[in-house]
Image (spheres, grey):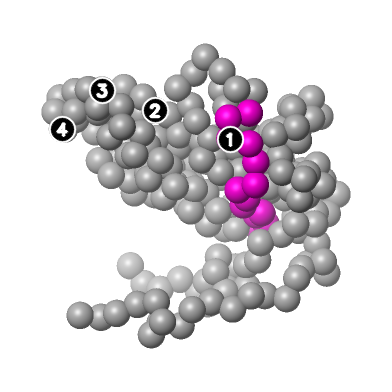
């Protein structure tokens, strides 16, 4: 593979920002489907792909989600065209015969027999997929506002009752108002955060 264009790198990384203020511009269902169809190709351990996404768009669903948000995240979530609940499936291993056929016979019993191991793998790999989710959204021209700052139990009770899905994080999506961005915070330098050994 060759390097991608500098403009693409800027869109994905160096010029991309976390947004809190949104333009009144809708995001189509087709775009959300395209977003998922990009993010699903990112690698996970043994192709477990445990991430599950709920795209909250309707007024009714958004009102329920707002009741779960910390006060500082209510307005930005209310005004975002879409809010994604990025979750994970605790029983992701049930799909391994399809997703990892050459190793499913060994791995399904390993995870089904150890709930803590399955939960750890689901959380780690869905977090990886959450990163791919943000990059896929940016690649499609969307802005993102990923957040903690919510009552996880309330989200699970409201949106995932009776299922094996659990929330990982929440991410607002849409077209951000670039005029309302805060000054960009610094990042650690290579020498502060990395080593070559």
Tell me, yes or no, if residue 146 can be seen here: yes
Between 190 and 99, which is closer to the camera in this rendering?
Answer: 190
Distance CA(mark 1)–CA(mark 2): 15 Å
**Secondary structure beneath disc 1?**
helix
Provide the residue span drawn in magenta: 141-154
Name the outermost residue toward the right: 24
Between 52 and 150, which is closer to the camera in this rendering?
Answer: 150
- The label nearer to you, 1 versus 4, is 1
Badge 1 or badge 4: first in the primary sequence: 4
Q: Using the rendered view, name the quadrant where residue 94 is placed.
A: top left
Tell me, yes or no, if residue 26 can be seen here: no
Badge 2 or badge 3: first in the primary sequence: 2
Discs 1, 3 touching: Cβ within 8 Å: no
Badge 4 or badge 3: first in the primary sequence: 4
- Reply yes or no: does residue 114 show up in magenta: no
**Secondary structure beneath disc 3?**
helix
Q: Which residue is mark 3?
A: 112
**Secondary structure beneath disc 2?**
loop
- The label nearer to you, 4 versus 2, is 2
Badge 1 or badge 3: first in the primary sequence: 3
Tell me if mark 1 has few (under 14), some (14-19) or many (20+) residues whose alpha carbon lies within 10 angstroms of its own: some
* Residue 47 % position (x, y): 30, 40
Discs 2, 3 touching: Cβ within 8 Å: no
Badge 4 or badge 2: first in the primary sequence: 2
Distance CA(mark 4)–CA(mark 3): 17 Å
Relative vertical location of residue 86 with respect to residue 7 in this rendering, above or below: above
Badge 1 or badge 2: first in the primary sequence: 2
Q: Which residue is mark 4?
A: 102
* Residue 28 % position (x, y): 71, 40
Tell me if mark 3 has few (under 14), some (14-19) or many (20+) residues whose alpha carbon lies within 10 angstroms of its own: some
Q: Which residue is mark 2?
A: 90
Q: Residue at x 48, y 26 (%)?
A: 165
């Amino acid at each position: 593979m060759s390097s991608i264009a500098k403009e693409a790198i800027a869109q994905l990384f160096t010029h991309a920002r976390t947004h809190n203020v949104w333009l009144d511009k809708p995001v189509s269902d087709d775009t959300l489907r395209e977003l998922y169809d990009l993010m699903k190709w990112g690698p996970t351990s043994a192709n477990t792909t445990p991430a599950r996404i709920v795209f909250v768009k309707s007024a009714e669903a958004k009102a329920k989600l707002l009741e779960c948000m910390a006060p500082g995240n209510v307005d930005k979530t209310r005004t975002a065209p879409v809010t994604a609940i990025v979750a994970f499936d605790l029983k992701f291993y049930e799909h391994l015969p399809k997703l990892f056929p050459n190793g499913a016979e060994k791995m399904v019993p390993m995870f089904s027999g150890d709930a803590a191991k399955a939960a750890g793998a689901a959380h780690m790999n869905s977090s990886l997929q959450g990163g791919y989710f943000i990059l896929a959204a940016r690649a499609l021209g969307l802005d993102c506002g990923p957040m903690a700052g919510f009552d996880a139990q309330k989200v699970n009770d409201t949106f995932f009752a009776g299922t094996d899905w659990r929330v990982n994080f929440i991410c607002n999506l849409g077209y951000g108002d670039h005029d309302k961005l805060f000054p960009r915070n610094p990042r650690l330098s290579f020498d502060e955060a990395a080593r070559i050994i």
